[in-house]
Amino acid sequence: MVNETATPAEAAAPAEAAAPGAAQPAEAPLSAASTPPAAAPAAPAAPRVAIVGAGPAGCYTAQFLRKRWPDASIVIYDRHDAPYGLIRYGVAPDHLGTKAIAKQFDRLFARDRVQFVGATDIGTTITLEQLQAEFDVVVLATGLWADRVIDSFQTDASAPVPSGVYGSGRLTRLINGHPAESTEGLHIGRRTVIVGNGNVAADLVRLMLTSAEVLASHGVTADVIAALTAGPLEHIDVVGRSPAGVAKFDVAMIKELAKLPDVRFTSDSAEPPASAVTPDAPTLDQAKAAAIRDLVDGSPATASRTVAFHFGFTPDRVSGGERVERVTFRATDPTALPATLELAADSVCTAVGFTETAGALLRRDAIASPTADLEHGRLADGLYCVGWFRRGPVGTIPANRADARTVADAIIADVEAALHTSPQLIKETR
Amino acid sequence: MNFVILYGTESGNAETVADDLVDELSADNDVQSIDMTDVELDTLTADAFYLVVCSTHGDGGLPASAVPFAEVLDAEQPDLTGIRYAMFGLGDSSYETYSRGSERIDERLTALGATRVGDYGRHDASDGSLPNDTALEWVRNLVAGLDADADADADLDDVAAVAR
Ligand SMILES: Cc1cc2nc3c(=O)[nH]c(=O)nc-3n(C[C@H](O)[C@H](O)[C@H](O)COP(=O)(O)OP(=O)(O)OC[C@H]3O[C@@H](n4cnc5c(N)ncnc54)[C@H](O)[C@@H]3O)c2cc1C
C-alpha cells in the first residue's frame, strides 16, 4: 500500500496553502534551452512529478521543473528524515559555503510549493511501480552510496581482511552526524594511509588534522572527535595511482591544506622539467603539480604532524594480524622505480570512489528499458534519472545542476509533446 | 526604470539572487533576468540598466554559465559605451580568490567602455550565509542612489528651464 502521507494530493495540499510565493513569475520563456515547441498548448502543463532523492540532483531538477510548470505537483521523496543527500552527509562540515547551497533548496519547500516526504525508501516503503502509477513523471536521483572497495584488499577467504580499513563514505557520514553511523570499531591510530587522490581524500587529510575545538565549532559530535583524535594522529600517507599533475584534486583543495598549522608536507612527485612548464599560462596539470610543490615548499621543516604524498602507486594488499599493520602498493607504471611502496599503518582510509549499494533495489541498469536514452536521463516511458545515479560518482554539486537542466529539458519536451498530441492524456489519469 | 539582470552561476545561488532581485524590483520597474549563457550581444542597450550578478568558481574562475559570455566579449570586442551596470559578486573569503569571478566580468565590461555605477556589492559565503539578503540591501541602496541622481538631473533640468 502507498503510505498515506505520501500520496501527492495529501502531500501537496498543506504546502500549497502555506505558499506566499505562489504568484512568483515563471522565467522559463527567457531561457533559450527550454523554448517551447512552436505549437505548444497555451496553458502550461501541470503534470504530477515524483522525484526520488533530495540530494542536489533531485533538488535542481525540481527547481527547473517548477520554473517551467508553476502549477505542477512536485513531490521529492527521500529515505532520510532530512533532505539534501551528500550536501548534508558528504560535504565536509568546515566547507560552510558549499553546505550553504542547501539553503537555496530550502526555498523549494518553503516557498515554491515543492513537497518533501522524508523517511520514505522507494523500493521498500513504496515500490517504484506504485510511484509510477501515481505520477506522470518519476525521476530517480538516488545517488551512489556505497564505498567502492579495493578488490586486491579483499584477500582470499581463508585470510580475512584485517580490521582498520575504512571507507571514506562511512567516515564522512560519521563526521557529518549521519544517524546510522557509529564510531564503534573505529580506530585511526597514529599513522593512517589514505588511498586515493581526489577531493574526498583531501577532505579527509584536512579534517583529520583539524583541531578538536574547530571540529566542535562545526558541529562534529564529541564521540566522533574523540575517535578521530585519539591516536593522536602523527602521520598521514596519501597515495594515488596517477602522477601529481593528473591527480583528481582541485587546486583550491590543495591550497587550503596550507592553512593547517604545524604540519610538514612532503611529496615523492618528480619535478616536471622546467622546460615543460609554460610560465604565463600554466596548464591544469602544471597548476596541480605546482600546488603540491608550493604546499611542500611552504610547510615547516619540522612539525609535530607530517603528511607524505605518494604519486603513481596502485594499492596491492593490506597485511597484519587482527588489525592492519602494513599496506603495500606497486608502481602504476610497471617500468617505474621503485616498483613497490610499503607503508606502516594503524589504519587505512579508502577514498577511491562510490558505487551502488549491494542489494540496492533501484539499480540503473536493471531499470533502463531497451530504448533508454541515458544521455538525456530517459530510462523508460515517464521514468528518468539524474545526478550521480545517472552518470556515475563523478562531479561536484554544480555538475548536477547542469545535469538537472539537461534532464529537466528532456522531461519538459516529452510531457509537452504528449500533451500536444493528446491533450487529455494528463488530465484523464487524474 | 528598465532593469536587466545578467547572472552568471555555477551552483545556482546567483540565480536565486537574480530571482529575488526580480521580485524586489518588479513592482515599480520593468525587469527581466537572463542567464549570461543566453545573452545575445546585440540586445545590450543603453536604454536598460544592467544588474550583473556573478559568482566565483573553484580557484578564482568564472562560473560555468558566465564562460560563454566572457568568451563572446573577448572574441567580438563590442563597443559598450553608454551601457550602465552595477556589479554584485558572490564568493567565499576562505579562498584567496574571493569574489574574483565577478571581477573577471567587471574588468571586461569596463574595458569595453561600459560604466559601472554605485557600490560594488559583494557577498562572502564563508560563514554559510545566503547572498540573497545582502543583495537585496545592495539593490535598495543602488536604486535609491539612481533615483537621487535622476532627481538631481531633473532639478538641473528645472534650473536650466528657469534660466532659459
Ligand atoms: C564525501 C564527499 C564529499 C563531497 N564534497 C563535495 C564538495 O565539497 N563540493 C562539491 O561540490 N561536491 C562535493 N561532493 C560531490 C557531491 O556531493 C555530489 O556531486 C552530489 O551530492 C551528487 O548529487 P546526487 O543528488 O546525485 O546524489 P546524493 O547527494 O547522494 O543524493 C541522493 C539522495 O537520494 C536518497 N536516496 C537514495 N536511495 C533512495 C531510495 N531508494 N529511496 C528514497 N531516497 C533515496 C539519498 O538519501 C540522498 O538524499 C562530495 C561527495 C562526497 C561523497
Image: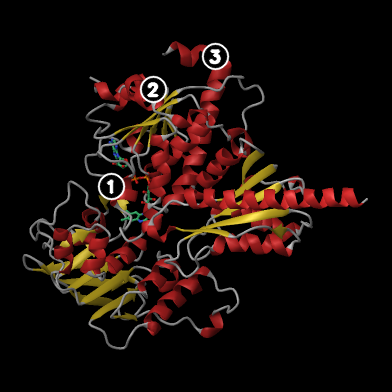
The residue lying toward the viewer, choosing from A291 and A226, is A226
Of discs 1 and 2, which sits in the foreground?
Answer: 2
* Mark linked to residue A421: none
Q: Amino acid at mark 2?
A: Phe
The chain identifier of the residue carrying mark 2 reads A
Q: Position of residue B82 (x, y in %)?
A: 78, 55
The chain identifier of the residue carrying mark 1 reads A
Q: Is residue B11 visible?
A: no
Determine the image quadrant of residue A157.
Answer: bottom left
Determine the image quadrant of residue A171.
Answer: bottom left
- Between the C-alphas of marks 1 and 2, the distance is 26 Å
Task: Work out whether mark 1 precedes mark 3 in sequence or the reverse, and give the earlier one.
Answer: 1
Q: Which residue is mark 1?
A: A145
- The response on whether ligand 1 sits within 8 Å of label 1 is yes
Q: Is residue A345 left or right of residue A102?
A: left
Report the quarter where the N terminus of chain A lies: top left
* Mark linked to residue A135: 2
Task: Work out whether mark 1 precedes mark 2 in sequence or the reverse, and give the earlier one.
Answer: 2
Q: Is residue A206 left or right of residue B108?
A: left
* Mark linked to residue A422: 3
Q: Position of residue B62 (x, y in %)?
A: 56, 59
